[in-house]
Amino acid sequence: MNAYVMHGGLLPGGVPVKDNQPYTIMNIRTVIADPKCPGGWRPTREEFLDKDDVPTYPWASQWRGPEHIYFGHDHKRQLRNSLICNRR
């Protein structure tokens, strides 16, 4: 089974699982499109969400796999139906 279990999540956009930083794996919730960042996505912290005038996305909504990702809840968004990410 090609699956990972983590607290937060991963950077979407084709960044290999092994290249995600421990802080990202534990804390990522929201991403902003940014072509200068790995995979084209920049993780952002909650306190910056209202300061950027750009669309933000839950990281899981942008995950394309191929790995299955099982992750904890997103406190601000509450329990998610997408707790298992497997988008292709």
Image (cartoon, rainbow, N blue to C red):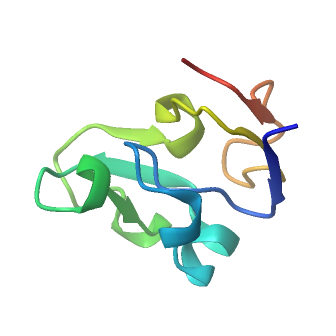
In this image, 20 relative to 77: left or right? Answer: left
In this image, 24 relative to 42: left or right? Answer: right
Taking depth in this image into account, of 18 and 63 the one nearest to the observer is 18
Q: Residue furthest front?
A: 1
Taking depth in this image into account, of 87 and 2 the one nearest to the observer is 2
* Relative image position of residue 36 (x, y in whole percent): 11, 60
Image quarter where the C terminus lies is top right
Taking depth in this image into account, of 49 and 10 the one nearest to the observer is 10
Q: For residue 80, what is the image quadrant? A: top right
Q: Is residue 20 above or below residue 39?
A: below
In this image, 15 relative to 79: left or right? Answer: left
Q: For residue 66, what is the image quadrant? A: top right
* Relative image position of residue 39 (x, y in whole percent): 30, 51
Image quarter where the N terminus lies is top right
Q: Is residue 84 above or below residue 76?
A: above
* Relative image position of residue 76 (x, y in whole percent): 67, 51
Q: Residue at 27% across / 60% down in the picture? A: 38
Q: Residue at 23% across / 48% down in the picture? A: 40
For the question of whether residue 70 can be seen, the reply is: no
For the question of whether residue 20 can be seen, the reply is: yes
* Relative image position of residue 2 (x, y in whole percent): 79, 40
Q: Residue at 47% across / 55% down in the picture? A: 11
Q: Is residue 48 above or below residue 32?
A: below
